[in-house]
Image (spheres, rainbow, N blue to C red):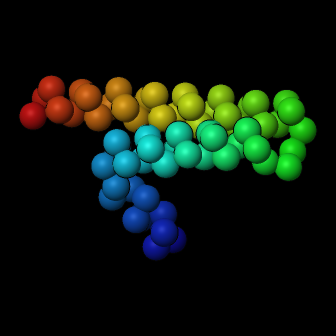
Amino acid sequence: MASFRLFLTRNPSARAAAHRAMARAALFADSSASTRLRRYNYHTEKARHLEARASEQEVAS
């Protein structure tokens, strides 16, 4: 539970960077091609969402 709280306290840009790293790692995982692509797409989309949220916060500030 403590690691979950740490993840929530990071800013969206740092979380997006983490998801981009996970997306790259998914491409080289020891899994089937469809699983790797699904994980890559999930983390890439999550990173895009977080970056959009970060830019919205910057504009609102």
Q: Residue placed at 48% from the left, 35% from the top?
A: 47
* Residue nearest the viewer, comparing 60 with 25: 25
Q: Which residue is the extreme one toward the left?
A: 61
Q: Is residue 40 above or below residue 59?
A: below
Q: Residue placed at 53% from the left, 40% from the top?
A: 20
Q: Which residue is the extreme one toward the right?
A: 32
Q: Which residue is the extreme one toward the bottom?
A: 2
Q: Pinpoint residue 16: horizontal percent, then vertical percent.
A: 43, 41
- Left or right, 39 with reference to 21: right
- Left or right, 46 with reference to 38: left
Q: Pinpoint residue 48: horizontal percent, then vertical percent.
A: 46, 28
- Left or right, 25 with reference to 34: left
- Left or right, 8 with reference to 38: left
Q: Pinpoint residue 49: horizontal percent, then vertical percent.
A: 44, 29
Q: Residue placed at 82% from the left, 37% from the top?
A: 35
Q: Residue placed at 15% from the left, 26% from the top?
A: 59
Q: How many marks overall?
A: 0
Question: Where does the C terminus fall, quadrant-wise?
Answer: top left
